[in-house]
Image: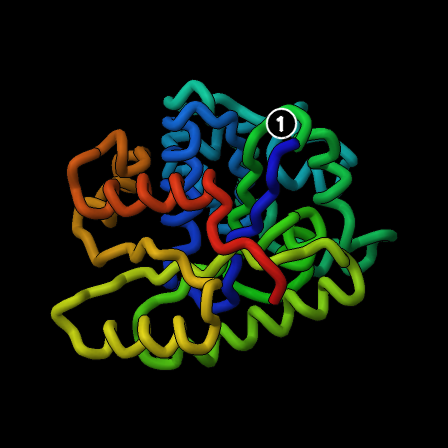
Amino acid sequence: MGRAIAIANQKGGVGKTTTAVNLAACLAAAERRTLLVDLDPQGNATSGLGVDRESLSRHVADLLFEGAKATDVMVDTAIPALQLVPAKRELVGAELELAELPDREHRLRDGLARCRDVFDFVLIDCPPSLGLLTVNALVAAETVLVPLQCEYFALEGLAQIIQASRLCRQRLNPELLLEGVLLTMYDGRVKLSEQVAKDVREHLPGRVFHTMVPRNVRLSEAPSFGKPVILYDIRCPGAEAYLRLAREVIDGGTKGAW
């Protein structure tokens, strides 16, 4: 049975979408059937995989509001084992619309029903908030992967997403576990990066991936070409990091209780 992973952090600019796109691509390159769900109104995971958002007739909002299933709306990507549930701008305002719907926290889970029977991995790219879209992802997921930038205030943001996930586990999804914390934007030349990495590993022993994603120009450039980094420059440090992360995830990662 496949594993559904929400990639979440309420802070913006920490590498959620970069991680979602590139981890999904690397899992698919390892011949794991992978579905990426773009749940961010910005739709950057969709464009980052080269999908034209304006040409889409169906997208993730149909799962949330129309009762559609993932198989009705998913599209192919340049990597054969990777499919995408895309997002469009219509997702803006979804928080307000969801608030008025019955069973509002379970809409995405219902739309993804049976996907874990078809895919080895289902990755959900969450928006930078702890609103109803992220709650839907946490209810639909088995685990949460938290990208965390190696910068000041990182631990404060980590505490907030962990608390939100624990509340979701208590009230909505008792099976929810922590997939692991991924350190991003790491620069070994900067003492602050080393200190943040040390602090996070001490704060959550055994729950931080060995892989650290470095600051890397090629990794930043790839989305503008509509490609995951392994199709843009597989030899760059960013691509190598996400290939290592994919291996950790396949092997079970740091998955465990909070």
Q: Is residue 232 above or below residue 44?
A: above
Q: Is residue 71 above or below residue 191?
A: above
Left or right: where 39 falls relative to 132:
left
Quadrant in the picture for residue 222: top left
The answer to whether one can see residue 233 in this image is no
Q: Amino acid at mark 1?
A: Val
Of the 4 image quadrants, the one containing the N terminus is: top right
Q: Is residue 180 above or below residue 57?
A: below
Left or right: where 238 falls relative to 119:
left
Numbered disc total: 1
Q: Which element is circle 1 on? A: helix
Q: Position of residue 10 (x, y in %)?
A: 52, 67
Between 67 and 115, the one lying in front of the other is 115
Q: Position of residue 32 (x, y in %)?
A: 48, 27
Q: What residue is disc 1 on?
A: 73
Q: Position of residue 257 (x, y in %)?
A: 62, 62
Between 48 and 240, the one lying in front of the other is 240
Farthest-out residue, top: 80
* Residue at x 57%, y 59% (from the top left corner): 178
Between 111 and 68, the one lying in front of the other is 111
Farthest-out residue, right: 102
Left or right: where 115 falls relative to 205:
right
* Residue at x 82%, y 57% (from the top left corner): 100
* Residue at x 58%, y 58% (from the top left corner): 256
Of the 4 image quadrants, the one containing the C terminus is: bottom right
Q: Position of residue 109 (x, y in %)?
A: 73, 43
Farthest-out residue, left: 189
Quadrant in the picture for residue 118: top right
The answer to whether one can see residue 253 in this image is yes
* Residue at x 72%, y 64% (from the top left corner): 168
Q: Dot 1: within a 10 Å radius of its alpha carbon, few (fewer than 14), some, or many (20 or more) residues?
A: some
